[in-house]
Image (cartoon, rainbow, N blue to C red):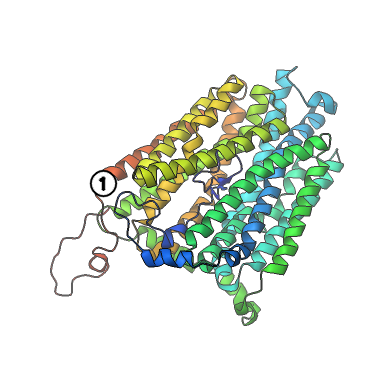
Amino acid sequence: MHAASSIDSDGFEGVHSSSSSRTPLLRTRALSDQTTCFMDTGEPDVAMPDKKAAVRRVDWLHFLRSLHLELFLFVYAVSYSMRLVMTQDLLLTKACLQRYSINATACRNLSWNTTIKDDVTRYANVHNLALFLIQFVPAGLLSIFVSPWSDRYGHKIPLLVATSGGILQDLTTLFTVMAVSAPLYATVLCAIPNGFSGGLVSVCASVYSNGTRTASAELKTVRFAFIMTALTLGFQLGLFVGGQVFRAAGGNYTAIYVTSAVLLALMFVWIGWTVPFSSQLHRTSRRELVRDLMRLDNLREGGRAVFRLRPGYNRAKLLLLMISIWFILFNSETARNINYFYTETRFDWNPVKFSNVTAFFGLVQLLATAVCVVVLSRLMQVRDLVLACLGVVAFALQNALKGISTHEWMYYLSYVLGAPGGAAGIGISSYASKLISPHEATKVFSFWTTCESLVPAFGDIFSSLVFNAALSYQPGLPFLIGAALQLFPLAALILCLRMPHADPEDDDETMLEPDQAGSTNQLPHTL
């Protein structure tokens, strides 16, 4: 995702998100299909008494019983998140033991020798980068093919495959934990089953797609609120649970991966029991299934929908918003990938303290963003793009202060300043939905999500390499650069604010087909 996605509260942009690492950064694109007035502050809301009456007639008990995939997403996020930080700490421990043959107790705190500490951190960070790339690059590429296929033939198979990949990663990593002499690259290679089975990217895409297809128009907003909450709370609870399990086990990594594997195994059974196979799957030959898996029709249609001519400046706005989301997600990945290494270097934090602090501020960001959206958007009628600007500024301030933090209170304050950062993704997604016709929302946002799934790779590479290069004199440099990069989305959002608004339905036929009478009507200005 946002899916980014991001496990860190930095990475969960858009309350979405970030995902954050996401993707992590994996935002709820489908909200735009039927809820374009969710934050309609620029234009008047449309009264819909019939829809409100329908909501009152909803069988809420039946609705809650239908949230079986949301429960799966919650538990999957807990499993994923609880092993995230512990794997980074495992890499640090192995790097220390194997490069310097120091006993495990001394490796827990290397502040007594800065040279060794920096070398171990660099070595572990490089392997952590490789692990993330193996997990997310194949998964992002697979989503281009798997997402359209699962929309046609059902989500059961992709979810079972992704869950199996997570179980295999846990079990193989468990072997490298028990075999202390196993090299670091063995732990990295354990991520192959997860990456090539779709992993978190496939899971989030399937759950979001299911919500889009099965939720009624009246309940679409509520359904996606549950999905976002399940993902966010799962990430933060996973961090907290991982730290507590690690401490209860006396610093033994085995308990982490056993717990994670058991949770995924339970979810494998849950999906097998609650999600039926698609009837279309039984009526289709294997050759046709494979052929449809290799099709790129949806990606091409999404690209045409994004880049086609639009009334006024709408195409320019849409492209600027899409690129802005990339920068925001890039910023989230910068934070997520090196946060633990940074706090371990600056403040000698252990994984338990880091997990507790990150989980707490992740919940703070979730609540702050929700309050920000309700108060500014619904009560004060602040425009979507202004809300997005507030989120971008919050992210920039958070990264800037985090980058120069020399005391723990400065690090904590950076999270306070960045608490409303999730409003950036919400404001951009909400405004983008008003630039396109309702019938093309799915195509446009599907294309956005596909492109975003590859952004984390660039964020991981950038943050890891810059962190290693500047470790000895300014380990916070990646955060400072990330803060500076937020000037682009801020400028893009301000530019969109200054552009006049155009109805997305205006002059569509005129732009797509020449006037049959041969007249030379002037087309709206487009970029």
Q: Residue at x 78, y 37 (%)?
A: 246
- Residue depicted at 53% across the width and 59% down the height: 223
Give x and y (percent) for residue 469.
Answer: 59, 27
User: In the figure, 281 relative to 191: above or below?
Assistant: below
Report x, y in % for residue 440: 39, 65
Instruction: Name the residue furthest bottom.
Output: 283
Q: The residue tagged with tag 1: helix, strand or loop?
A: loop
In percent of width and height, residue 301 lies at 43, 66
Q: Quadrant of residue 475?
A: top right
**Image coordinates for residue 182, horizontal then vertical, percent:** 83, 41
- Furthest-top residue in this view: 112
User: Quadrant of residue 360 in the image?
Assistant: top right
Q: Nearer the viewer, residue 358 or 513?
A: 358
- In this rendering, position of residue 270 left or right of residue 294: right
Residue type at the position of mark 1: Met
Q: Is residue 57 above or below residue 310?
A: below
Residue at (69, 62) in percent of width and height:
161
How many C-alpha atoms fall within 10 Å of the one at disc 1: few (<14), some, or many (≥20)?
some
Residue, disc 1: 499
- Inspect this view and state whether residue 9 appears: no
Q: Does residue 157 appear anywhere in the picture?
A: yes
In the image, taking residue 470 as reference, residue 272 lies left or right, namely: right
Q: In the displayed structure, would residue 481 be above or below residue 128?
A: above
Residue 278, compared with residue 133, is above or below; it is below
Total count of labels: 1
Q: Nearer the viewer, residue 197 or 260?
A: 260
